[in-house]
Image (cartoon, rainbow, N blue to C red):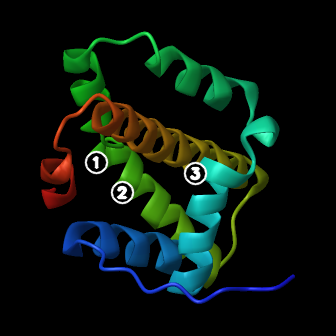
Amino acid sequence: MAAQALTLQVPTPLYTQLKDRAQRAQRSLEAEFLAVVETVLGRDEELPEDLAQAIRDLEVLDDEELWSAARTRLPDEARARFDALNFKRQSEGLTPSERAEQEHLLHQSDRTMLVRAHAARLLKERGHDVSSLMER
C-alpha cells in the first residue's frame, strides 16, 4: 500500500495520551496514531455494533450533551487496572480471565475515545470552538 507523509502539530495533552496508549499497546507512536485514525475513519462498517450505535446516538444530542460526551474520560480505576494488567502481561503473563478483562478494558477505552472524538467533530460542525477539549 502506498503511503503519504503527514506532519501534524498535536496539542501536548493529546500527544501524551497517544504516547501512553502506544506504550501500553507496545506499539510505536506512529502505529498507535494510525490505529486510532483507522478506528475513527477507516472501518465504520467493521465497528462492533455497540460502538457504531454509540456514534449514531451522538447525532441526536443537543450541544450541552455533546460537550459532556466530548469530556468523558475512562475512570481512573479502569485506567489503573488496564495499566496493571499490561505490566503483568509483560512480566509474567495473564490468565485467561485477566486477558478477557484486559480486552474489556481496551474496548471501554476505545469506546470512550471514539465517542469523545465524534462528539468533538459534531460540536465543531455546529460551529463551536473545541480547542478547549485539547487542553485536558
Location of mark 3 (residue): 106
- Is 70 left or right of 3, judged from the image as shown? left
Q: Residue at x 28, y 48 (%)?
A: 76
Label 1 packing within 10 angstroms: few (<14), some (14-19), many (20+): few
Front residue of 101/134: it is: 134
**Reading the chain from its start, which is encountered first: label 3 or label 2?**
2
Asked if 64 appears above or below 71 in the picture, the reply is above
Amino acid carrying mark 2 in the image = Ala
Q: Quadrant of residue 112?
A: top left
Label 3 packing within 10 angstroms: few (<14), some (14-19), many (20+): some
Q: Residue at x 66, y 28 (%)?
A: 52
Element type where label 1 sits in the image: helix
**Reading the chain from its start, which is encountered first: label 3 or label 1?**
1
Q: Tell me residue 16's x, y (percent).
A: 30, 75
Asked if 119 appears above or below 78 in the picture, the reply is above
Element type where label 3 sits in the image: helix
Amino acid carrying mark 1 in the image = Asp
In contact (CB < 8 Å): disc 1 and disc 2? yes
Q: Tell me residue 31's x, y (percent).
A: 62, 79
Q: Residue at x 66, y 59 (%)?
A: 38
Alpha carbon of mark 1 to alpha carbon of mark 2: how far?
A: 6 Å
In contact (CB < 8 Å): disc 3 and disc 1? no
Mark carried by residue 100: none
Front residue of 87/45: it is: 45
User: Quadrant location of the C terminus?
Assistant: bottom left
- Residue 102 visible from this viewpoint: no
Mark carried by residue 76: 1
Label 2 packing within 10 angstroms: few (<14), some (14-19), many (20+): few
Front residue of 96/70: it is: 70
Amino acid carrying mark 3 in the image = Leu
Alpha carbon of mark 3 to alpha carbon of mark 1: how far?
A: 14 Å
